[in-house]
Image (cartoon, rainbow, N blue to C red):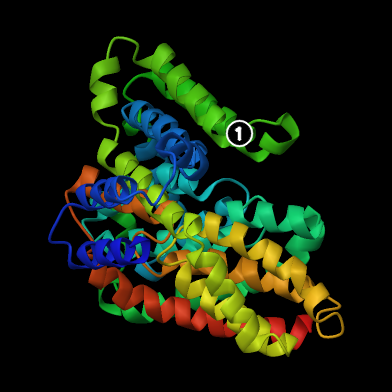
Amino acid sequence: MALFIFLFSYTILITEKVNRTIVAILGATIMMILGIFENHVEAIKDYVDVNTIYLLMGMMIFVSVIRKKGLFEYLGIVTLKSFNKNGYILYFGLTFIVAVLSSIIDNVTTVLVFIPITLAITDSLDVDSMPFVLGEILASNIGGTATIIGDPPNIMIASAAGLNFTEFFAVNGIISFINLFAMQLITILLFKNKLNFVIDKEKVKSFDPKSAIKNKFGFYVSWFLLILTLLLFIFQHQLEMESSTIALFVGFLALLILDRNEVEEILKEVEWGTILFFFGLFIMTGGLVQTGILKDFTHILVDIAGSSIRSFTMMLVTVSGIISGFVDNIPFTATLIPVIKNLQHINPETFSNLKPLWYSLSLGACLGGNLTPIGASANIIALAMLKQFKNEEIKFTEFIKYASIIVAINIILSVLYVELILI
């Protein structure tokens, strides 16, 4: 029943006939009603990632507050002046910055900061924002594979495998930049017509960053809060702070300092539908964990490819990439970690060195997030902001049409990298 509800819900999501929030919440509650979870309160506690939920709430509030102070418009003009040759250079520059930032701070935070900047740029140039938004979504997930702190599965994998920051980056950093360059090249070819524009330098010269500053006090405070936010995210592990704590703190601090009289208006701008969608999606994925479906699946993988480390790494990258496009990669990674650890007991000769497997799991779980519009939190948030600020949408099928090509190429490159370099 859990598998049927999950697959049926995803079918409805793909057709986009019903609002995704309704689908996710009904799927989750039907699982509960049918007794898939013994205790509903425990199911919510065990499977709903409240850190992600509160992170989204805090950062949505933060972005809504400082967006009104002209900071994003200002950064958009400065970025445009830095990459003012043509559409290709602008696209390359924006996606590169997003990827680098996503390797340092949470992907969701990166897109929450950069999507408004990007929309400000595309509006000023009067060009289609879709290729830029899609490219930044893809870049954020690819960049997140580079470091331990870039994506939650990497934190879990590094902890289980005993890998430090430098060691992890030395391996995953290389393939991340290879995958990023491949993504940029392919998307530029795919969106050749939409990115093939020359930026009018005279027009750009007329853009004055200072014109974005509506209120000097609000603008400078926004800068301070943005820098404070980035520093807190960069050093969150040293400070022993959760992402959600930082997001809620800066969100409500910005509200207190800059918009204390507009609280109700700011709260209305929070994408509550997106937050509820996440809630339902976490519960549905939890149903697959609760019933042992994910665990059984991992054991099937071991039975199929457990006699050779080369075949197992190849399958691990590929299967993790596909599944992580549809299932939240955090519980999936949590399910696979003990399976990989147990391989040395099953076949100590073949699996004497587990490091290739750890990196394979990381690459598959992180890159797979690019496969669908709901494959990663950053995807959902970026598309929600596109809808919120521009009233435009990238359809489920349209997203997969482009993203599947990128994911397939990235997975092939990752498999070759693991097979040739790590084994």
Q: How many marks?
A: 1
Q: Position of residue 35 (x, y in %)?
A: 35, 48
Name the spot of residue 386 as percent of width and height, x first: 26, 50
**Which residue is at 82% across, 73% downward?**
345
Image vertical order of residue 239 relative to residue 30, above or below: above
Task: Give the answer, above or below, for where 65 lies relative to 100.
Answer: above
Residue denoted by label 1: 242
Instruction: Classify 409 as above or below 3.
Output: below
Secondary element under disc 1, as helix, strand or loop, is loop
Q: Position of residue 418 (x, y in %)?
A: 70, 81
381 or 123, nearer to the observer: 381
Q: In the displayed structure, does residue 118 sit left or right of residue 179?
A: left
Give me the residue at 54% from left, 55% from top: 330
Amino acid type of the residue tagged 1 in the rendering: Glu
Q: Is residue 232 left or right of residue 225?
A: right
User: From this viewpoint, is residue 414 visible?
Assistant: no
Task: From the viewer's side, name the closer residue of 216 and 46.
Answer: 46
Given residues 85 and 154, the one toward you in this image is 154
Quadrant in which residue 85 is drawn: bottom left
Image-quadrant location for residue 317: bottom right
- Residue 94: percent from left, percent from top: 45, 58
Residue at position x 43%, y 42% from top? 113
